[in-house]
Amino acid sequence: MKQNPIIRIIVKLLVPFIVLFALYVQLHGDLGPGGGFQAGVIMAGVVVIYSLIFGSTAAEKLISFSIIRSLIPIGVLIYVGVGLFSLIKGNNYLDYSALHAEAAVGQHMGIFVVELAVFVTVFATMTAIFYAFVERQRQNEEDPE
Amino acid sequence: MIVTVGGMILQRNLVAVVILGSVYSFLAATVLVVLDAVDVAMTEAAVGAGLSTVLILAALNLIKSHQSRSTRSVILPLVITLIVGCVIAWGTIGLPRFGDPETPMQQHVSPYYLANALRETKVPNVVTAVLASYRGYDTLGETTVIFTAGIGVLMLLSRRRRIKPLNNESE
Amino acid sequence: MASIAPHFSVLCVVIPLFGALLCAIIRNSRAAWLLAVCSALCSFLCAIFLLIHVKNGVVSYAIGGWQPPIGIEYRVDSFNAYVLALISAVGCLSILYAHNAISEVSPQNRSWYFSMMLLCLTGVMGMAATGDAFNLFVFMEIAALSSYVLIALGKQREALVAAYQYLIVGTIGATFYIIGIGFLYVSTGTLNIADLALRITPIKTTIPVLTGIGFLITGLSIKAAIFPLHAWLPNAYRFAPVPASALLSGTATKVALYILLRFIFGVLGAQFLLGTFGFYEVMVTFSLGAILCGSIVAVFQKNLRRMLAYSSVAQVGYITLGVALANENGLTGSLIHIVGHGITKAGLFFVAGSLLARLGSDHIADLAGAGRRMPWTVGSFIVLSLSMVGLPGTVGFLGKWYIAFAAVEHGSWWLAIIVIITSLFALIYMGRFIEMAYFSSRNEEKMKFLANPMSWNMGLSVAIVTGLCVWLGIDTEVLIDKARAAALLLMGANL
Amino acid sequence: MTGSQILLQLNYWLIIIVMMMGFYVVLTHENMIKKLIGLGVFQTSVYFLYIVPGKVIGGTAPIIASGYQVYSNPLPHVLILTAIVVGVATLALGLALVIRINEAYGTIEEDDLYGRGEWHQ
């Protein structure tokens, strides 16, 4: 399957669209269905498809394991950070009204940031788990016991 | 859905089970759309039919994918399952009628979200508003769960030093 | 002061979470450990502050600024402040102990291991602090997932299977909990526990509510390892790395018990369940079953940690026995025993871990003569064992005393006698090890220290726990006051 | 209980059948992967226990738009979104464990496992 040029070209063509779709789901989450989690999963799907067709080495060139790994905590850190920020501002924990003079706008901003945080962690985690599985297999093949 | 799950129980080839599981998830997602839960349907389709399937297949790649014939007694588990099922069925008899707008769960709390979410958060998708703001702390917890799982998998599967898994565990 | 007090309720959960994230980024295990200890300590201080502060009433904190039941509420009263203080203390000590005690974890994973311990602490703290039934589930899963990982990284390959079994059983437990909450939610329309208690009053005997409660109790009993549902526990404690065993025995099961009590007494009211369904008989039967089975099986164990695990099953039996009696002294006794057992058992695991680290084994037979090699460590073990048996002057005495007293008060003399007799079982199984450690010289010449000396932090944790155990046993007022306040709160909730 | 009511209860009963099947798989099967899949089915069926009562007849998805007055209950959707995420996290961790078990023992059938190793020491 990996050698089939048709599949390779189709996937190459598809990838930008899936990325676009993921971004749409992410940014459109407050108007229609979707949000950080779904977008993160779809985005991780891009890496999975890419890795299935072009091999995990190619996928790691696209986005390396170490970057993915350091992204995992960053998402949650953003989330916790938003909460702490509102705490410092004198509001309750995770009260996004603190983010802007007008409470509702602050809420909207807060939701956007938080969805982004979810996206980062979900995308990074799912990709990392997939990489870990693939990596394990490669090690097993190199080092059969 | 029932047929699919039945197939999953009987099938011994694990790859087939996974594919059936994926079909099941898609069916579930369709039902969820009918029930107006579009966000959940989308997630179920992405996760159940997509991600879980990929993960299980990736894992099966590492493991032999055929199940051996079970020799275990099935009577006790069957009895337990039936008891659990009957208790739930008994419990649902008292539940409000399907689609009734007058039930407690439609009258309490959730009308507040529907009435105020747009004004208070400027987000028309009430599910998103509740998820990220009103119950934002749940979502923080959820993200933490993902984080935990991610780190956990990496810890379990990372391998730098060579260890021999059999007999030689104690370094 | 009053204005910032509520913030502590959320801080004592968020600080360990924040620490866990930083630990995950730092790759240096020593720095990560220091950070982990600091954040656990901060969390402990917050909990102590709350414990002092809740005397003035309930601390309610609306997360995100949304008033409950619209938003998620953190609600700390004298009951969960008490539990928060216990689990943050055990968490803090376990993490303090963990440095140099997790040789089985590969070096590049150590900082992540501390991160996992902090996450587990975050999870249990969140479970104890929250006033929202669904938020509780989320934090329950944080604690559960991190504890699966903590267990799986044990030295032997059985640890993996133990973790897998726990994963399956734990997830079934959590799913049962979710089913239960689902029924309650559909019947009342709310997820806030305080609100639930109000709205459930008129419909307590309807079928969905009863079903929901049944699932809830079953699910939580699995998590708390209450007697017939305890099968996952011995393997998990036996094969996990030592700090994880201590952390889990002192926090995870205790919090599940807390939630069980919260629902039985706080939401339903004591008289409701206890009066109607033969609940008392069932609880007493299970408690006695736990005490007897746990104690007897523990006597025959060859492995120190496995013995401690079965002893845990038995001790949970004492706690549920106090609950079944459902009078003020019984509950006070249960609550004291939650703390007493939590601390003592953590300490015993610490000692077992020190022996394991120093002598390379935790099989009782291999530890013959250990008392002369490691007098301080085994000395602490004796003190802690006496607490487990329930000798006056230790914290273990208080709890059992109150439970036995409550049994007499309840009119069940025979229960009080059973409590006393079964305590002798503890004397037997603990005594077996002590005898071996001091009076057997079977393999003294064979025994030699491993190269790595015991590090100061391990010794310090053991010392602190032993000190706590004795201090709480002698200066009894500290603990009894808090426990009685909590018990009165629970009994008052059924009015 | 009238006939139409029984018919409406059917929704629940179908869910319960699926739920029981999932639970049965978890209890009986000794293949670890299959157990995890069964657990997934069990959890998914529980989601419906939340979503089904949240539906309002004549309602629409809870996205505020002009022209619609009746919406289905958004709160169960939120809860179940969270539950799905938790479920997949558990699945991922379970799979990682199974992979490790397979490497350590060479099998993932539980009965084969218990024959080996020092379980009672």
Image (cartoon, helix red, strand yellow):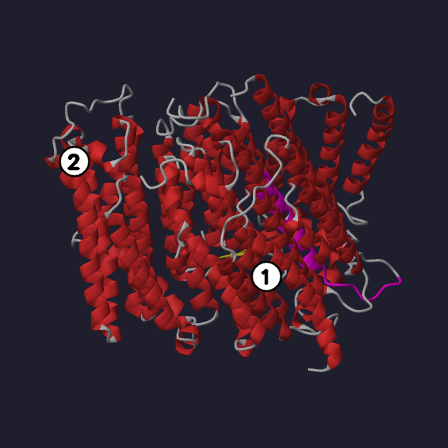
Question: Which chain does the numbered disc 1 sit on?
Answer: C
Q: Amino acid at mark 1?
A: Pro
**Residue C304 vertical position relative to residue C269 in the rendered view, above or below:** above
Nearer mark to the viewer, of 2 and 1? 2
Quarter-wise, where is residue A123 in the image? top right
Q: Earlier in the sequence, mark 2 or mark 1?
A: 1
Crowding at dot 1, Cα within 10 Å, few <14 / some 14-19 / many 20+, comes out as many
For mark 1, what is the residue? C68
Q: Amino acid at mark 2?
A: Ala
**Residue C154 vertical position relative to residue C236 in the rendered view, above or below:** above
Q: Which SS type dominates the magenta stretch? A: helix
For mark 2, what is the residue? C437
Q: Residue B42: where, in percent of width, then height?
A: 76, 48
- SS assignment at label 2: helix
Q: Is residue C56 left or right of residue C448?
A: right
Q: Residue A38: where, in percent of width, then height?
A: 73, 43
Along the viewing direction, whichever of C205 and C304 lies nearer the viewer? C304
